[in-house]
Image (cartoon, helix red, strand yellow):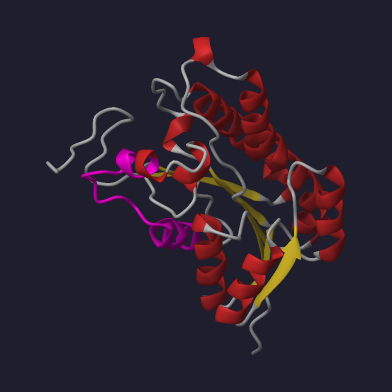
Amino acid sequence: MTTPVRTALVTGASSGIGAATALRLAQDGWQVVAAARRLDRLAALAERQPGIRPCALDVTDLRSVEQLADAVPACDLLVANAGGAFDLTPIADSDVDSWARTYDVNVLGTVRTVQAMLPALVAGGGGHIVLTGSTAGRWAYEGGASYTAAKHALVAVRETLRLETVDRGVRVSEVAPGMVETEEFGLVRFAGDADRAAGVYAGVDTLSADDIADVIAWVASRPAHVNIDLVQVTPQQQASATKIHRRPA
């Protein structure tokens, strides 16, 4: 008996958790559409692993999202991973434009992508949507309000989407990591300041992108009658946003 081909769309796939997830799902036998803005990164990813197809995507651009939906007419799994943090500034000193950018990428970008891909997910007999959230969706911390506000909003999106799609056979899950050290997250947040980015993770055996890809792959591999609503995963040394056991330098 031939195993049916399963198609997964992974957004934000040019680096970090998205790239690791695209690789892991392809290794697990999925046909993966890896979507992001940087096509050169996606092409390099596709060269590393058969079963990955690059596709241009800017989740903040509605036309780009619509073009993605046209390019992926069949979809069984959507990993809505595109997102990021762009500052670590107290509310009193924060730039509202940075807040708007954070919300647009993390929340509105997810909503645009879900809206575009939901018909294909439903047409396939009830697909699966996995959102990459964060412990920031549950834990507030000083300077993190723009990001925590966006990730709290993403929790509301996930919970509401679950209610609205349950009768259409769609599963909706969230994987919410704590401290994950990737090559770009901290650099983007701190405008390229590598020392400041590295300082966040000093003394901690952090999670890796592969750790989170492993969790996402597990969530996606559950039987169709099983919905994993939320997986929150942290390094052993991280008990909250501020309770972190760091090894001495």
The magenta span reads 197-219
As drawn, 68 above or below 197 = below
Q: Quadrant of residue 104?
A: top right
**Magenta: predominant secondary structure element?**
helix
Q: Which residue is drawn at 43% across and 58% down?
A: 209
Q: Nearer the viewer, residue 168 or 101?
A: 101
For residue 247, above or below residue 21 = above
Q: Where is residue 127 in the image (x, y as percent from the top left)?
A: 68, 57
Residue extending farthest left: 248
Residue 242: x, y in percent? 29, 27
Q: Residue at 55% across / 24% down in the picture? A: 146
Quadrant containing the N terminus is bottom right
The quadrant where residue 161 appears: top right
Q: Where is residue 63 in the image (x, y as percent from the top left)?
A: 87, 48
Horizontal arrangement in the rendering, residue 149 relative to residue 71 (left or right) = left
Picture quadrant of residue 73: bottom right
Q: In this view, does 191 lie above or below 144?
A: below
Count of numbered labels shown in the rendering: 0
Does the rendering let one see residue 49?
A: no
Q: Position of residue 101 (x, y in %)?
A: 66, 31
Does residue 243 appear left or right of residue 139 in this picture?
A: left
Residue ID at (39%, 42%) = 197
Residue in front for this viewpoint, 21 or 225: 21
Q: Which residue is drawn at 47% across and 39% down?
A: 134
Q: Can residue 20 be seen in this view?
A: yes
Q: In this view, does 117 lie to the left or right of 138?
A: right
Instruction: Determine if the magenta segment contains residue 158.
Output: no
* Quadrant including the C terminus: top left
Which one is in front, 240 or 193? 193
